[in-house]
Image: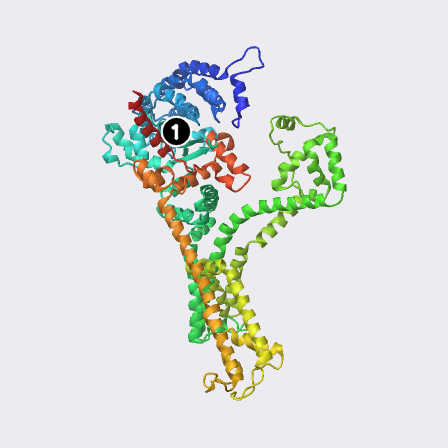
């Protein structure tokens, strides 16, 4: 009933106002838990997992009632003796400190016992974590802090570290499962026994994350386990004097484990508060954490991709940041998929070095063309391959062209499996939705027939479904039921033949939820729509044609002539930083350059008109005929060809500077023509040419200013919350560097989004559900960034609260 964090249903399970006798199921579930925990140790010793399984189910039931959060259920649960029961359960199902292996235990009885203990504790820890979700006050966290026995929790962490082999001993349960040879890896239950280390690691993460989160939501109290917070924050183990001798055995390994497996982000919870969120890193992200080069490159990519214009507006910056983070997550997922196959893994490795491959492709093309020019080596299209081996020059040229072709093919293969794959996976669904919308608009546009059918469907009891049923009978209905539009078509066809609604649709409508999708097989129309969307999407992708052009040029270089490799020069302008800056400069000033060019053409045209009307006849100083102006078209063309170079004096077949009259009152026509040519020279060289140069220079300056803005923003403001560096240097220990590395690290937000995609929706916590809802239901691009803590930081907020408490203490006393 409460799956999905529906608060109304959660409240109903606690209080039934329409019933004569209300029953608080939270209290009843805790009472059942108390009864079960009395029998838990005995059942585990006897190898009976029925009590443990029932305790797990009870915990899951209560967790769904509390998660979301439901504050009234949180208070009700915290007001029972549940926390004291947790102390007793944690205390009575510890792992043994010394382990004596049983040689005859090939069926894994000891592993089964440990797995039952682990499942119970994981269920309790998940429930305890749900108590801390979005607490508006310190009441519930304070009760958890006061009642829970952290010595028992610390002992549990210590025993887990020993079991997992972090204390200098080998793991108690080898990952290869040699001690359970009788277990069948194809059986899900027995496979879990073989892979029990993963479950135990999950339990350790839950213990540590709960203690760390409780410390985050109770800032005014001392940390429950101080050494755990220091280990997670990266403090050197050798400098931690508070460690006990036993903790020193596993502290270094535990620190490495937490930094590799546990992530931390801060979530803006519906604009009401900032929620600390600890989450388990996916295996893919755990591997990436240890790759320092990948981390540095990805951080640079994230920082440099957010546009400089948006950095002045934190909400817009947050929205752009989310898009960049999702793009990085797409790359992680793509690399993970490629790594599952040996051939695709090779493609993934090639894709990592794509920039090096682009450089090799470009420089091979340049070197090949230079060698061809110096050695005068070439071949004709009709030449056979044996004929190209006549001399050493063509042999070297042919080998160079083949190597260049190989690099280009590798480049194209990596592009198809990475960038094109990612683009199509996002672009095709969007294209399908756009085509459906277009077809629906066309259907509405055609006559009144569609509207009459729509009205009839609505009157027959279909309600909201009538509008979409029109599509199924009109032009738009041909594709209305495919892909992303399946939910809409389901809503349209919920009504049965007699006009009544199915039970699922009725319940959804009563709760204000979308109707459940209908089970419908895809038809040939769906596949036609998919094919059309695929063709349209790939046709609109310019980079696809760019890489096809490179491959075609390389193939033509082998079969026709190496001169076709000149097309690879485009790599410099589209992929190299210096070339891209030049293209960006032209793009920035393109309109102004075009306007200036039009002005230059108009100026040349004006001078051509004057020449045709006044100076087309030769003067006495000319050494031949006058300018080529027999017709105005000829005159205009001649002016265009000479004027574009900035000097029209060559049109007049005389050296104007040597034919300047000796007196002002002599040869006035020649003087007028000299002044006319001089005037054009001044306009072109001192005005128009400088305008062109100034526009390009201004564009480069603007690009440099953008880069300076990005660098300055990166060094002085947090990328996540957009708060100034000086605030953190003043308020928190460790300052700005500590904040961007430990509290608002952009990589943690990448890993968090990947964790969301890898986690089933029914397993979401309250915070994860909030973020997922924002990402899925954002009406505008800006709304996608509302879950980020813009202008908020828990560390700063806690520092301000502590400062206010210190100032108010003496005053209050």
Give the secondary structure at mark 1.
Answer: helix
Q: What residue appears at the point 48 percent right and 17 percent down from the top-left corner?
A: 26
Left or right of 570 in this view: 468: right
Given residues 71 and 290, the one toward you in this image is 71
Given residues 35 and 430, the one toward you in this image is 430
Q: Is residue 800 visible?
A: yes
Q: What residue appears at the point 62 percent right and 28 percent down from the top-left corner?
A: 508
Given residues 559 and 518, the one toward you in this image is 518
795 is higher (above) or lower (below) than 70: below
**Looking at the picture, how far across and down is residue 46, in whole percent?**
40, 17
Colour scheme: rainbow
**Looking at the picture, how far across and down is residue 39, in whole percent?**
41, 14
- In which quadrant will I find the N terminus? top right
- In which quadrant will I find the C terminus? top left
Give the residue at mark 1: 206
Left or right of 481 in this view: 661: left
Q: What residue appears at the point 43 percent right and 59 percent down from the top-left corner?
A: 700
Q: What residue appears at the point 60 percent right and 28 percent down from the top-left corner?
A: 512
Quadrant position of residue 158:
top left
């Amino acid at each position: 009933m409460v799956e999905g964090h529906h608060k109304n249903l959660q409240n109903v399970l606690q209080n039934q106002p329409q019933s004569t006798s209300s029953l608080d199921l939270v209290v009843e579930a805790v009472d059942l838990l108390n009864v079960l925990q009395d029998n838990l140790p005995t059942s585990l010793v006897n190898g009976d997992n029925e009590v443990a399984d029932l305790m797990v189910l009870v915990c899951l039931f209560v967790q769904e009632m509390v998660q979301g959060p439901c504050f009234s259920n949180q208070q009700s649960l915290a007001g029972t003796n549940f926390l004291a029961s947790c102390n007793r359960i944690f205390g009575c199902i510890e792992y043994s400190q010394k382990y004596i292996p049983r040689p005859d235990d090939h069926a894994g009885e000891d592993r089964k016992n440990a797995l039952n203990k682990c499942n119970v504790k994981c269920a309790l820890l998940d429930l305890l974590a749900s108590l801390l979700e979005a607490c508006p006050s310190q009441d519930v966290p304070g009760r958890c802090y006061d009642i829970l026995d952290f010595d028992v929790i610390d002992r549990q962490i210590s025993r887990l570290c020993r079991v997992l082999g972090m204390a200098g001993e080998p793991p108690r349960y080898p990952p290869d499962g040699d001690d359970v040879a009788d277990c069948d890896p194809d059986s899900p239950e027995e496979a879990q026994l073989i892979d029990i280390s993963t479950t135990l690691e999950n339990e350790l993460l839950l213990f540590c994350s709960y203690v760390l989160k409780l410390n985050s939501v109770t800032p005014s109290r001392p940390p429950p386990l101080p050494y755990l917070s220091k280990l997670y924050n990266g403090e050197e183990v050798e400098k931690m004097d508070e460690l006990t001798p036993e903790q020193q055995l596993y502290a270094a390994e535990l620190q490495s484990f937490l930094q590799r497996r546990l992530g931390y982000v801060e979530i803006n919870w519906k604009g009401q508060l900032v929620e600390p969120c600890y989450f388990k890193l996916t295996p893919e992200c755990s591997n990436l954490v240890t790759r320092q080069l990948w981390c540095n490159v990805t951080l640079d990519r994230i920082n440099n991709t957010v546009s400089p214009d948006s950095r002045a507006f934190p909400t817009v910056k947050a929205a752009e940041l989310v898009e960049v983070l999702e793009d990085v997550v797409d790359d992680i997922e793509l690399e993970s998929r490629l790594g599952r196959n040996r051939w695709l893994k090779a493609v993934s490795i090639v894709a990592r070095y794509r920039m090096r491959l682009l450089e090799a492709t470009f420089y091979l093309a340049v070197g090949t063309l230079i060698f061809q020019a110096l050695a005068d080596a070439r071949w004709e299209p009709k030449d056979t391959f044996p004929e190209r081996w006549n001399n050493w020059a063509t042999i070297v040229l042919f080998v160079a062209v083949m190597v260049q072709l190989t690099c280009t093919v590798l480049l194209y293969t990596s592009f198809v499996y990475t960038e094109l794959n990612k683009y199509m996976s996002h672009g095709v669904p969007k294209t399908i939705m756009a085509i459906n919308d277009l077809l629906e608009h066309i259907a509405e546009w055609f006559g009144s027939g569609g509207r009459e059918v729509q009205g009839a469907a609505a009157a027959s009891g279909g309600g909201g479904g009538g509008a979409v049923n029109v599509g199924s009978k009109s032009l738009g209905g041909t594709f209305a039921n495919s892909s992303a539009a399946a939910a809409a078509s389901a809503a349209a066809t919920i009504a049965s033949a007699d006009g009544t609604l199915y039970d699922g649709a009725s319940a959804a409508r009563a709760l204000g939820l979308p109707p459940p999708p209908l089970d419908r097989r895809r038809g040939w129309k769906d596949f036609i729509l998919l094919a059309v969307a695929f063709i349209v999407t790939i046709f609109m992708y310019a980079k696809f044609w760019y890489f096809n052009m490179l491959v075609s040029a390389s193939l033509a270089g082998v079969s026709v002539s190496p001169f076709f490799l000149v097309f690879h020069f485009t790599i410099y302008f589209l992929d190299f930083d210096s070339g891209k800056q030049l293209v960006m400069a032209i793009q920035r000033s393109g309109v102004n350059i075009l306007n200036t060019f039009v002005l230059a053409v108009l100026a040349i045209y004006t001078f051509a008109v004057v020449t045709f009307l006044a100076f087309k006849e030769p003067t006495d100083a000319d050494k031949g005929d006058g300018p080529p102006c027999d017709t105005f078209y000829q005159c205009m063309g001649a002016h265009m060809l000479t004027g574009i170079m900035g000097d029209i004096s060559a049109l007049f077949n005389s050296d104007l500077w040597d034919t300047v009259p000796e007196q002002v009152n002599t040869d006035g026509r020649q003087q007028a023509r000299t002044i006319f040519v001089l005037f054009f020279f001044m306009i072109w060289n001192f005005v128009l040419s400088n305008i062109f140069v100034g526009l390009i220079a201004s564009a480069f300056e603007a690009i440099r200013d953008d880069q300076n803005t990005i660098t300055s923003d990166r060094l002085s403001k947090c990328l996540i919350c957009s708060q100034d560096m000086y605030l953190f240097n003043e308020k928190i220990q460790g300052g700005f560097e500590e904040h961007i590395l430990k509290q608002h690290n952009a990589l943690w937000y990448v890993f968090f989004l990947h964790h969301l995609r890898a986690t089933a929706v029914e397993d979401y916590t309250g915070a994860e559900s909030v973020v997922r809802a924002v990402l899925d239901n954002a009406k505008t691009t800006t709304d996608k960034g509302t879950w980020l803590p813009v202008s908020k930081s828990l560390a700063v907020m806690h520092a301000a609260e502590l400062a206010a408490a210190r100032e108010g203490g003496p005053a209050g006393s």
